[in-house]
Image (cartoon, rainbow, N blue to C red):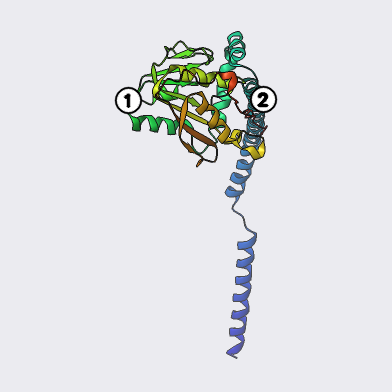
């Protein structure tokens, strides 16, 4: 008799629990349902608008990126054309060429600076250090000075020469005919600037303006002095300069991008020195850049 009520109570309890569970699963608060629905309705247009703006921004970014790439290719093409021109004409022809359109010179140097940005070390910096180590009293002639970086980083008196002058300190001229007096400078520098087909006349001009025992510093692209790939033999190049009236002090082949030559003008004046037509100058192949 006592067990039956217990069973009924248990069953009733189970039913109540089941019913409670069902109610908890199925019941959804009405206020949350309405708020969620309203949020979806209100955020829908905003999300579409944001998505549209994002797509527009992405398209604009792609368009700008494409234009930048095209401009870079166009600038690179102009640089390669101008670079080849400078290597395959005389200094006088190059001077006249840039006189007609000086902006081409700016275009060339912009491309040149971009190329130099890929070099791990710049030869002009080595020459700057050399000058600082040898004292500020030495007068310098910088043949093919570009942006006159050399003059801006040393205390020496520097005469800067190039085909076009965008700086009051730079003299525009043919480097085979500078306005300097004979035997008036202590150091002549050619930093990646032996570009014309008549480069030997630049070196003869350097000989003219240098004092006896004056220094001639030359930095050139290494491939121009690689006989295995059509470049000049550096020994033949050195021999020709020595015949001009210099003595070779040293060569630096340690850098993978360029070579440095150090010469000194012979102290004695050799009235019997060979004329330029008697010196066998090696041909320096043009340094032409490939399209990236």
Q: Name the residue at the bottom extreme.
A: 1
> Would you say the residues marked 1 and 2 are in contact, meaning their CB atoms lie under 8 Å apart?
no
**Picture disc at residue 136:** 1
Q: Earlier along the polypeptide chain: callout 1 or callout 2?
A: 2
**Picture disc at residue 77:** 2
Task: Name the residue: 61% across, 67% down.
Answer: 21
Task: Name the residue: 56% across, 29% down.
Answer: 114
Snapshot quadrant of residue 54: top right
* 170 relative position to 257: left or right: left
* 71 relative position to 205: left or right: right
How many numbered circles are shown? 2
User: What is the secondary structure assignment of the residue under circle 1?
Assistant: loop
Picture coordinates of residue 142, whole percent (x, y): 45, 21
**Picture disc at residue 66:** none
Q: Nearer the viewer, residue 138 or 145?
A: 138
User: What is the secondary structure assignment of the residue under circle 2?
Assistant: helix
Label 1 or label 2, whichever lies nearer to me, is: 1
Q: Nearer the viewer, residue 70 or 247?
A: 247
| The C terminus, quarter of image | top right
Q: Nearer the viewer, residue 222 or 73?
A: 222
Assess disc 2: are there few (<14), some (14-19) or many (≥20) residues with their C-alpha within 10 Å of its C-alpha. Answer: some
* 35 relative position to 191: left or right: right
Note whether 63 is above or below 23 in the view shown. Answer: above
**Cα distance, mark 1 to mark 2?**
40 Å
């Amino acid at each position: 008799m006592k067990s039956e009520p217990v069973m009924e109570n248990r069953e009733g309890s189970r039913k109540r629990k089941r019913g409670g569970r069902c109610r908890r699963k199925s019941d959804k608060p009405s206020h949350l349902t309405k708020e969620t629905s309203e949020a979806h309705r209100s955020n829908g247009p905003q999300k579409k608008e944001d998505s549209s703006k994002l797509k527009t921004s992405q398209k604009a970014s792609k368009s700008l990126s494409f234009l930048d790439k095209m401009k870079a290719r166009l600038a690179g093409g102009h640089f390669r054309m101008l670079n080849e021109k400078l290597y395959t004409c005389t200094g006088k022809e190059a001077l006249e060429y840039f006189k007609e359109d000086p902006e081409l010179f700016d275009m060339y140097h912009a491309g040149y600076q971009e190329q130099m940005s890929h070099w791990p070390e710049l030869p002009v910096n080595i020459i700057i250090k050399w000058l600082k180590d040898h004292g500020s009293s030495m007068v310098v002639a910088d043949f093919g000075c570009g942006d006159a970086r050399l003059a801006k980083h040393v205390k020496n008196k520097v005469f800067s020469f190039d085909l076009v002058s965008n700086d009051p300190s730079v003299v525009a001229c043919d480097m085979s005919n500078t306005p300097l007096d004979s035997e008036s400078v202590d150091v002549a520098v050619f930093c990646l600037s032996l570009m014309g087909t008549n480069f030997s006349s630049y070196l003869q001009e350097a000989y003219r303006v240098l004092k006896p025992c004056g220094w001639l510093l030359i930095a050139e692209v290494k491939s121009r002095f690689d006989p295995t790939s059509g470049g000049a033999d550096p020994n033949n190049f050195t021999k020709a300069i020595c015949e001009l009236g210099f003595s070779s002090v040293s060569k630096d082949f340690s850098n993978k991008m360029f070579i440095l030559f150090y010469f000194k003008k012979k102290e004695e004046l050799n009235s019997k020195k060979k004329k330029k037509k008697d010196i066998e100058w090696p041909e320096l192949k043009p340094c032409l850049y490939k399209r990236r």
